[in-house]
Amino acid sequence: MKYIAALIAGIVVGAAVAVLFVVKSPYTPTTDSRLSDPTLTLTPTSSGSVQILNSATGYPWLRQQPASALKPEVAGARTSVQVFSAPTDVTGVPSYAVRFAALSNNGKPINGELAEESVWHVVVPGYGSLIIGGTDNLWAFFREAAMPLVRQQDWRGNAQIRTTGLQGTESADVLGVSGAFVEATGRAEYLQRVRSVSLTQGTAFEGQLRVEMRFPESQVPQVEDTLVSEE
Amino acid sequence: MKASFFFGILAGIAAVVWLGWSAPFVAQQRVSSETRVQNNGGRLERFEIRLRDDQISVVPGRDAAPSGTTPAQLSWVQSVAPFSQSASVYRLRNESGTVIGMASRVRGVTTAEQVEWVLHIPQRGSLVLTGLSADIAETGEITGGLREFATLDGTWDARLDADDVWRIDTLVVAGGAR
């Protein structure tokens, strides 16, 4: 009997050590930028003046904004949608941006991964529209904020979330949809610095969406002069 | 007894590593698609949006008649909207009425009649539709997509029926891989 008790005690200790190692491991997924010369940069943030809507199902760290907003409630999926009026460096007025996201089954905590698929639909004033698809790694944020959230406490810190590509590539994929971006492709990355999570105020963050476009030579649009000259 | 304890430690570590590697940390479901093979070629998939139940947000464009937003409390400056008509975000349903994703519709990025949809279905991908809109009837081509929809070619049409339901039919041409 005492051998079984020792075995069980050993299993508990071993499991606790392994969990602590995974949660407290110094390994942090890289957040270094891969795009040195982006064509355009959007800077969405959580402040009310630029994030005009936030709605989620199954994301305990996101606050419904406005409170009356309809939730996505996609069957069997934890999903969120944000709508931004995001300042954009190449235009004087902000871009309109919709960000759909859903947690993904693909991430493995043992690898420092908590994956989220995200898709942006962006309309840039005077240029046109594009979509961006990538995978966000929420692990660095989750590792720091999970325990306070479980204990129903507010969290303050500095966790970064980075978007990578869909097929294991290092940048998100960009597809031009209309206007100057028709038939253009490119890559993008989204870096989000999460500052705090409040049970009443939601998540405070600053984001930076950097987009690098490649235009077909036969179809260089006129309104795109500014963009071409920067390349 | 010591040997049992140390063996237990190793077993506990191995169990966590195995769980961390193989167990689903997030268990997202994937709803089956309701795609139909057409007699005359192509595959049809119909999506629905019930305007009374599925409007997450609606904001007016700079050339649209002054109007409020949905929900009413959005901080939206209509005069500097980067589109002329409207932009909306909806829940997206399959033909059976199950919510399977979300949709973004923007009208007037280039001309007043131009319309574009992004249909996003978690665990499947995103489909981009562009075309022309005559308010309650729209038609155009499948412009592209991401993940499962990345290689599809085809056409689409949408109509807002009298029951306030958008019905969006996407017809993927057979062998439409690019």
Image: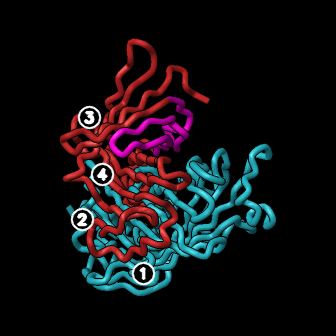
- Residue visible at 40% across and 62% down? B64
Locate the N terminus of chain A and report the quarter of the image it occupies: bottom left
The label nearer to you, 1 versus 3, is: 1
Residue B90: image location, x then y, percent: 32, 53
A22 to the left or right of A209: left
Observer-nearest residue: B22 or B100?
B100
| For marks 2 and 1 on the same chain, the one whose residue lies earlier in the sequence | 2
Q: Name the residue under label 1.
A: A49
Q: Please determine whether, in this image, residue A39 is positioned above or below residue B155.
A: below
Residue B91 image label: 4
- Are the residues flagged by discs 4 and 3 in contact, CB closer than 8 Å? no
Label 4 sits on a secondary structure element that is strand
Amino acid type, callout 4: Arg
Position of B178 relative to A130 (above/below): above
Within-10-Å neighbours for mark 2: few <14, some 14–19, many 20+: some
The label shown at residue B95 is 3
